[in-house]
Image (cartoon, rainbow, N blue to C red):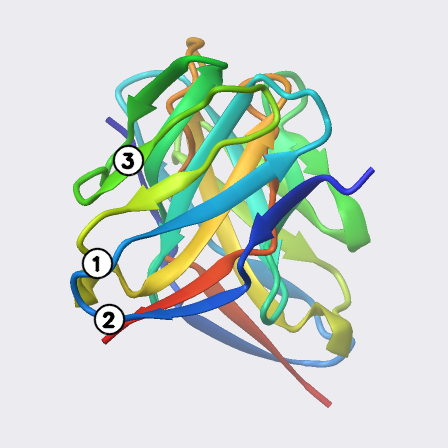
Amino acid sequence: NAGVTQTPKFRILKIGQSMTLQCTQDMNHNYMYWYRQDPGMGLKLIYYSVGAGITDKGEVPNGYNVSRSTTEDFPLRLELAAPSQTSVYFCASSFTSYEQYFGPGTRLTVT
Amino acid sequence: AQSVTQLDSQVPVFEEAPVELRCNYSSSVSVYLFWYVQYPNQGLQLLLKYLSGSTLVKGINGFEAEFNKSQTSFHLRKPSVHISDTAEYFCAVMYSGGGADGLTFGKGTHLIIQP
């Protein structure tokens, strides 16, 4: 039981490039979330999903897209990367809506 | 909408001393409350949660927190800290009325344990 896994661990992007951050969970959780963490700040919610085929915006969705075609996977897509998207990205999942399990994070730098 | 304030960005404490990390929240609706810990270069791990019932909640690693509705606080305490408790601690809230709109986090408190 691996829990929540994220790939890659680190990535450097040039401005304007695009990439997909992968998130997979093997706990059969319905709820999945993407957060970003900036230095000295708490985590902010980007997008969330309550099940396959259902996604919704969080607090800071601009510049990102998500999809949820299966229960296990919840990829986060960055189109036209900008320096403001330099951050650490965390994926989380939960069986109910209130006990979330976090992945180890992806550290992204946009230069 | 809800918000979370962690009053201290850093708390230095000597090993084996007690510690309290403060958390206040504001919300116009009923909420659930959480404390998470983040060790260096790792994801977040749930320490404890308050959903309902007893206002004193015990968590992992000897931590506990007390929910105070009148003061809208959820302070985290440990009677005797160890070097291994050095980490970032986040307080978070979630609307308790259902739905899945995620957690609202405070900015975090860096607990520094001095030998």
Q: Is residue B19 above or below residue B49?
A: below
Residue at the (49%, 14%) spot, across then down:
A52
Mark 2 surroundings within 10 Å by alpha-carbon count, few (fewer than 14), some (14 through 19), many (20 or more): few
Q: Which of A33 and B104 is in front in this view?
A: A33
- Which of marks 1 and 3 precedes in the sequence? 3
Mark 3 surroundings within 10 Å by alpha-carbon count, few (fewer than 14), some (14 through 19), many (20 or more): some
Q: What's the CA distance linking mark 1 and mark 2? A: 7 Å
Residue at the (64%, 19%) spot, across then down:
A95
Q: Which of B70 and B57 is in front in this view?
A: B57
Of the two numbered discs 2 and 3 in the rendering, the one whose residue sits closer to the viewer: 2
Using the image, name the chain to which the residue with label 3 belongs: A
Query: In terms of image quadrants, where is residue B108?
Result: bottom left
- In percent of width and height, residue A64 lies at 25, 41
Q: What's the CA distance linking mark 3 and mark 1? A: 12 Å
Mark 1 surroundings within 10 Å by alpha-carbon count, few (fewer than 14), some (14 through 19), many (20 or more): many
Q: Which of B37 and A29 is in front in this view?
A: A29
Which structural element holds mark 2? loop
Q: Is residue B5 above or below residue B34?
A: below
Dot 2 and dot 3 within a common chain: yes
Q: Which of A57 and B69 is in front in this view?
A: A57
Using the image, name the chain to which the residue with label 2 belongs: A
Query: In terms of image quadrants, where is residue B16?
Result: bottom right
Amino acid type indicated by mark 1: Ala
Q: Name the residue under label 3.
A: A65
Task: Tell me whether the residue at label 1 lies in contact with that at label 2, contact meaning CB atoms closer than 8 angstroms.
Answer: yes
- Which of marks 2 and 1 precedes in the sequence? 2
Q: In this view, does A46 lie above or below A38?
A: above
Mark carried by residue A14:
2
- Which of marks 3 and 2 precedes in the sequence? 2
